């Protein structure tokens, strides 16, 4: 298809975006970036990690999104005593038939809210690895596919370290986006006060189905991305691995490990989904810049020297985008 055809298809398919955003906005005040990035994850098959201090409506935002979709939703509260079987399911013995049968866990759902994911121990976190990447679960000797769409939205609290288990690099790399959310503005906080203390029930109407989402995902994949923009994405990822080759010598001692090829794939897919949400059938370098920090911030591992200088991955990502030439 040429760009004109893709543009027409995008405009036709993206009608639900405004409807769904309006439904979510009935409950969530502000946090427009969070809503937009949750939709990007939904439309590009990418899991999302949301980080913010308590009380910023992380859990509420995910629950509200799921209410706007006619789909199965499971909220899993991650705790230190949770077991992998509580998540994926297990084999259960039936004494009447003298045989084992599979009892599937709550992971067999379209939308999963992994609340406070860093409260569960490593063996539970690793039980999510196969589900998130292969979209299947192995119980006993058999492997079972997960329903489509399948999306994990996890939340974590950055300020409490007691009783938490930091996510290992292999696990955190499975998340397409790591979204950091901050406090609302004064006007937004007043709206929150009025809305949440009125005693009125905030009802969300489902506006799309899983079939709509699966169809829209195909359209997102068809969005045009020019060779120059592809090269720009690759240059950005390579600049996190070999900064000296992109005139970023100052970053060399600060980065222990750069972004993986998964970052290249996710940066491309997220840019396409961002273009779709804005009614365009093509990706611009600006799309890549806007979504870039959320894709890269959890994929760059800093050295001790960077930590001593109080550098963050966000600082490094900003310098990479500033240093790499825009086509």
Image (cartoon, grey):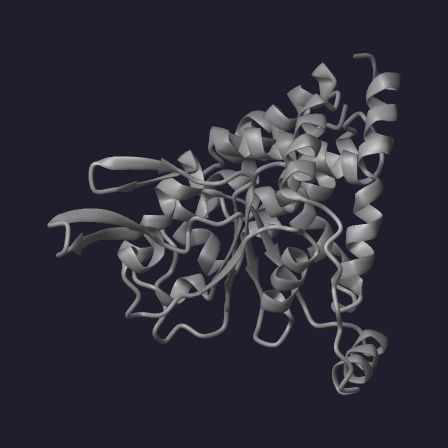
Q: Position of residue 27 (x, y in %)?
A: 75, 69
Q: Position of residue 304 (x, y in %)?
A: 40, 53
In the displayed structure, 203 sits above or below 11; it is below
Q: Quadrant of the N terminus?
A: top right
Q: Position of residue 173 (x, y in %)?
A: 45, 43
In the displayed structure, 300 sits above or below 92; it is above
| Image quadrant where residue 96 sits | bottom left
| Image quadrant where residue 29 sits | bottom right
In the displayed structure, 71 sits above or below 225; it is below
Q: Residue at x 75, y 78 (%)?
A: 201
In the displayed structure, 34 sits above or below 174; it is below
Q: Is residue 15 visible?
A: yes
Q: Residue at x 71, y 22 (%)?
A: 222
Of the pair 75 and 253, the residue shown nearer to us: 75
Q: Residue at x 40, y 42 (%)?
A: 131
Q: Is residue 100 left or right of residue 281?
A: left
Q: Residue furthest top?
A: 1
Of the pair 162 and 251, the residue shown nearer to us: 162
Q: Is residue 239 visible?
A: no
Of the pair 181 and 192, the residue shown nearer to us: 192
Q: Position of residue 144 (x, y in %)?
A: 35, 37
| Image quadrant where residue 95 sits | bottom left
Q: Quadrant of the C terminus?
A: top right
């Amino acid at each position: 298809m040429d760009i004109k055809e893709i543009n027409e298809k995008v405009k036709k398919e993206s009608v639900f975006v405004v409807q769904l955003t309006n439904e979510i906005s009935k409950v969530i005040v502000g946090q427009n970036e969070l809503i937009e990035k949750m939709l990007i994850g939904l439309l590009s098959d990418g899991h999302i990690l949301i980080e913010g201090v308590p009380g910023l409506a992380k859990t509420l935002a995910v629950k509200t999104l799921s209410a706007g979709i006619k789909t199965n939703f499971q909220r899993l509260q991650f705790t230190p005593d949770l077991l992998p079987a509580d998540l994926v399911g297990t084999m259960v013995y039936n004494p009447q038939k003298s045989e084992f049968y599979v009892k599937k866990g709550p992971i067999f759902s379209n939308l999963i809210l992994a609340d406070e994911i860093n409260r569960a121990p490593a063996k539970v976190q690793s039980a999510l690895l196969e589900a998130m990447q292969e979209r299947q679960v192995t119980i006993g000797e058999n492997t079972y596919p997960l329903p489509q769409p399948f999306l994990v939205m996890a939340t974590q609290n950055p300020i409490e370290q007691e009783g938490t288990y930091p996510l290992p690099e292999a696990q955190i790399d499975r998340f397409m986006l790591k979204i950091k959310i901050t406090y609302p503005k004064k006007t937004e906080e007043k709206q929150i006060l009025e809305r949440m203390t009125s005693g009125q029930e905030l009802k969300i109407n489902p506006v799309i189905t899983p079939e709509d989402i699966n169809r829209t995902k195909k359209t997102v994949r068809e969005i045009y991305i020019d060779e120059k923009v592809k090269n720009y994405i690759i240059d950005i990822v390579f600049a996190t691995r070999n900064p000296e080759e992109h005139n970023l010598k100052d970053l060399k001692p600060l980065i222990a490990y750069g972004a993986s090829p998964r970052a290249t794939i996710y940066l491309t897919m997220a840019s396409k989904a961002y273009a779709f949400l804005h009614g365009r059938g093509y990706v611009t370098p600006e799309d890549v810049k806007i979504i870039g920090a959320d894709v890269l911030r959890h994929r760059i591992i800093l050295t001790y020297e960077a930590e001593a200088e109080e550098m963050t991955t966000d600082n490094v990502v900003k310098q990479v985008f500033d240093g790499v030439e825009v086509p």
